């Protein structure tokens, strides 16, 4: 399928389902198709998608997995701790016309890198040898990690995602609360990565959990592009 316009990409990504059973402790908020399409289109425009191997970390139901392949990525792998979301992503493969999409269930807290993860998959890593992840490292990693703001969530989980990403890809696109931008940039730099670009979005948070009092609220987020080479 040839995608020639961002709006076309957005329309297809609208068909990617949201988390089937959002879990507050995982801070699960699905990325809207408008934001996913804009990020991917920007990444594509500077050469970070077409012909690249992509990891969609904390993928949910795979919106960046599918979107990157629609823009010409050579392979894309979605990773998420939530088995329900991964199962739904796999079912969606039948509805979206892409090749070389794969999904695995894994907890980023248990691994230091993509290579570390694959070496602990009980022999399943042969599958990924065929996906052109050279040296078990991706060209690009896209992540919308939990922000670590919920009391029931895992403390500093956003830092763990950053560390995993820096060890796993040459280029990273990472979502964060706008208020933490300066800290996150410094954290990337401390890990040896350089932040080169920034995208700013109003991320809609729908009323999903008991503590939500508004039907929807926009939260300002930044997506930072970092390089590790």
Image: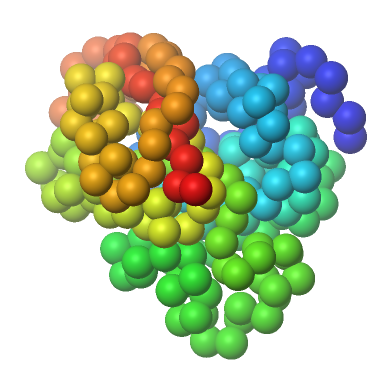
Please name the residue shown 67% across and 71% down the image: 128
Taking the image as drawn, is residue 214 in sight? yes
169 lies left or right of 217: right
Choose between 115 and 220: the one closer to the eye: 115
Looking at the rendering, which quadrant does residue 196 occupy?
top left
Residue 81: image location, x then y, percent: 40, 59
What residue is at 72 percent from the left and 13 percent from the top? 7
Q: Residue at x 69, y 22 (%)?
A: 45
Kindly indicate the quadrant of the structure image that contains residue 90: bottom right
State whether residue 217 is above or below residue 189.
above
Check the image and report above or below for 207 versus 135. Answer: above
Judged left or right of residue 115, residue 17 is right
Question: Which is more toward the observer, 29 or 219?
Answer: 219
In this view, the residue farthest toward the bottom is 123
Residue 25 seen in render: no
| Number of numbered labels in the structure image | 0
The quarter in which the N terminus is drawn is top right
Where's residue 215, x and y in %? 31, 14
What residue appears at the point 79 percent right and 15 percent down from the top-left corner?
Answer: 5
Q: Residue furthest right?
A: 1
* Residue sitting nearer the eye, 64 or 54: 54
């Amino acid at each position: 399928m040839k995608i020639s316009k961002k709006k076309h990409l957005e329309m297809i990504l609208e068909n990617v389902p949201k988390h089937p059973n959002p879990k507050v402790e995982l801070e699960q908020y699905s990325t809207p198709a408008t934001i996913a399409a804009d990020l991917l289109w920007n990444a594509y425009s500077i050469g970070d998608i077409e012909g690249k191997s992509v990891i969609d970390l904390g993928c949910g139901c795979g919106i960046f997995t599918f979107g990157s392949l629609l823009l010409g990525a050579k392979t894309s792998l979605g990773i998420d701790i939530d088995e329900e979301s991964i199962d739904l992503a796999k079912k969606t493969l039948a509805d979206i016309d892409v090749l070389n999409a794969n999904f695995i269930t894994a907890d980023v807290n248990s691994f230091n890198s993509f290579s570390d993860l694959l070496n602990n998959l009980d022999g399943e890593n042969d599958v990924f040898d065929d996906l052109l992840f050279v040296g078990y490292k991706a060209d690009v990693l896209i992540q919308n990690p939990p922000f670590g703001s919920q009391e029931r969530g895992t403390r500093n989980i956003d830092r763990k995602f950053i560390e995993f990403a820096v060890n796993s890809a040459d280029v990273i696109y990472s979502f964060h609360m706008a208020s933490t931008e300066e800290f996150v940039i410094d954290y990337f730099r401390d890990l040896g990565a350089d932040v080169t670009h920034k995208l700013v979005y109003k991320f809609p948070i729908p009323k999903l959990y008991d503590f939500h009092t508004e039907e929807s609220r926009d939260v300002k987020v930044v997506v930072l592009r970092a390089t590790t080479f």
